[in-house]
Image (spheres, rainbow, N blue to C red):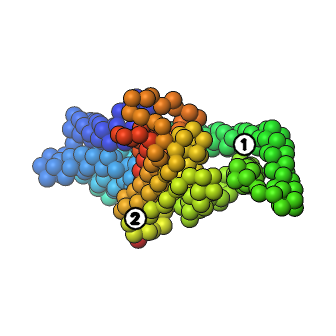
Amino acid sequence: MDTGRLRVPAGVMDWAIAVSVAALLLGTGLSGQHPARERELLGSVLLAAGGLVLVARRRAPIAVLAVTGLCAVGYQAAGFEVLAVSYLVAVYGTVRAGHRTLAVAASVALLLVLPLTALVFHDGPAREAFAQARNVLELAWLIAAFAAGEALRQAERRADEAERTREETARRRADEERLHIARELHDALTHQISIIKVQSEVAVHVARRRGEHVPDTLLAIQAAGREATRELRATLEALRDDDTAPPHGIGDVPELVERARSMGLDATLTIDGQRHDVPAAVARTAYRIVQEALTNTARHACATAASVRIEYRADCLAIQVDDDGKATPEGVPSPGLGLLGMRERITALGGRLRAHPRAEHGFTVRAELPVERRS
């Protein structure tokens, strides 16, 4: 809800102003000289209407300007000499909304119509008629209302511009920080990973050339080195440009399972539910969850088997990875960086993560990522 500077709801403030102006106009009109009978009733209605219509000045400033102007002409014709406070407030609101030319044109027209109305409906000399018109709408008050509206409009424009400048500065600093991180990662990791990749490939090549058996662990190191090089390159590209398409998704999960098998883990993949498109961020997070879970299983769980289950639901994508490792319900797993990073990814998408030992032995990781089905 929109609020004013004093934390008062905008709707309450609008009604307070409208009722106050209507009461002021009625009190001023009825306390001074005013006509009787039908003309008194008509003038009172126009005075009240001119004030109450101000409740819509934020939503329809032009319409409110027209109504308050007509009410001013109407109650002057009925015989009330009351300053058109409601019209001044409407001018202020119209100028604040940016309709300066229209406010000037309407005010000039009203300044011409009021004396003519006084001449037609006033029985005295022309001088008194013009004095009556000045009492309804004085030029000085009109200029003040116009100036107040323009001053506040300029202040709000400068505030919006300052806010945009702050956002642009924050984005620029974030871009600079991403580039800095990318350079640091490149300098710190690329060289070392390249050495691992080259040495493993040389070892595999030499072993095959000699006709020797290549150990599965060496092949796994070679594959991991290639994957790490590719992942690092993709990460650096993402840091340099956050609009870069995600390098992995759900379609790449079978490769993770196959890689886990090559490392000696009896890994299986099950996909349930009717497949449908999911947001890129959800697909990328699902891949990372499976990757991290299988990596932890291969490195730390002392497991022989693992199962990956992906379930497409109407409102979410469920991922579950189970292993038969050494974890037991009595043990308290230490929250490593992988699990913390996984939780941060899932929380950022508004999902849920459960990671705990299984009832018999082993460990389970289950994540639910909310999705929006596309019609």
Q: Residue at x 38, y 33 (%)?
A: 329
Q: Residue at x 57, y 38 (%)?
A: 300
Front residue of this view, candidates 190 and 181: 190
Front residue of this view, candidates 169 and 147: 169
Residue 236 percent location from the top left of the image: 74, 49
Relative to 192, 335 lies left or right: left
Residue 202 percent location from the top left of the image: 86, 53
| Res 280 visible | no
How many marks on residues? Answer: 2
Residue 17 percent location from the top left of the image: 33, 38
Q: Residues within 10 Å of mark 2 (few under 14, many from 20)?
A: few
For residue 83, which numbered disc appears in the image?
Answer: none
Residue 171 percent location from the top left of the image: 67, 43
Front tag of 1 and 2: 2
- Relative to 349, say whether 180 is above or below: above
Q: Earlier in the sequence, mark 1 or mark 2?
A: 1
- Report which quarter residue 185 is drawn in: top right
Residue marked by disc 2: 272
Q: Residues within 10 Å of mark 1 (few under 14, many from 20)?
A: some
- Report which quarter residue 252 is drawn in: bottom right
Callout 1 secondary element:
helix
Q: Are marks 1 and 2 in contact (CB under 8 Å)?
A: no
* Quadrant, the N terminus: top left
Residue marked by disc 1: 178
